[in-house]
Image (cartoon, rainbow, N blue to C red):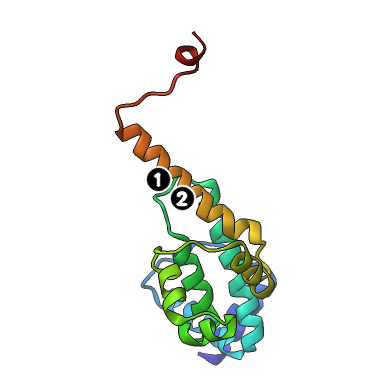
Amino acid sequence: MMKQSKDMLSQLTNGILTEKMDIGTKEYEDFRLLIRSKVAETPKEERIRIALIGLKFQIEDYLQSDKEIIPIGNFVKKFINLLEIKQVDFARYLEIRPSNLSKILNGERRVTTDMAVILEKLSKIDAELWLRIQSKNEIRQVEKSYSDGDKEYNLMELIS
């Protein structure tokens, strides 16, 4: 296994391992074990930095998509989880009550501009991106309520 892992690693670094692998094969399982071993060797700070880049891509992908609404609290939860800390410790660090953080995570409260700036400082993900999630969701909810309603808004009706 060790020699096979070294061979696979050298193929990765040389750009050779570019063919598809079938899930469930021994080759795929060996590859997964290799990746896990490399992740385990990576310092926590580096793992978090890499995970934050992934979170930023998830946020940007969501903002550009027409996917179902994903509450901003879900992204904040992901952030807290990738830091490998408890929500209560995160709330304490932010100097807010855990119940207030819980309300943000559950979509009962909005993320404030202050909170977005703090998230930016901690995550290096622009405060504007955090707030755009919230704005996108609110706009989509309002649009849905207008499409369900009886009132139509029409410029020609207004100016005639």
User: Does dot 2 land on a helix, a strand or a loop?
Assistant: helix
Q: Is residue 138 above or below residue 118?
A: above
Residue 17 can be seen in this image: no
- Counting the numbered discs, the total is 2
Left or right? Give the position of 143 relative to 47.
left
Q: Is residue 127 above or below residue 13?
A: above
Q: Quadrant of residue 60?
A: bottom right
Residue under label 1? 141
Left or right? Give the position of 127 relative to 55.
right
Q: Residue at x 50, y 17 (%)?
A: 155
- Local crowd at mark 1 within 10 Å, few (<14), some, or many (≥20)? few
Q: Quadrant of residue 116?
A: bottom right
Instruction: List x then y, in percent, for residue 137.
Output: 46, 50
Judging depth in this view, the residue of 142 and 67 nearest the camera is 142
Residue under label 2? 137
- Local crowd at mark 2 within 10 Å, few (<14), some, or many (≥20)? some
Residue 133 can be seen in this image: yes
Q: Mark 1 is on which residue type?
A: Gln
Q: Residue at x 35, y 33 (%)?
A: 147
Judging depth in this view, the residue of 69 and 92 nearest the camera is 92
Judging depth in this view, the residue of 126 and 104 nearest the camera is 104
Q: Mark 2 is on which residue type?
A: Asn
Instruction: List x then y, in percent, for residue 123.
Output: 64, 72
Left or right? Give the position of 72 relative to 51.
left
Q: Is residue 68 above or below residue 116?
A: above
Q: Quadrant of residue 140?
A: top left
Instruction: List x then y, in percent, for residue 16.
Output: 64, 67
Q: Residue at x 61, y 79 (%)?
A: 48
Are discs 1 and 2 less than 8 Å apart at CB?
yes
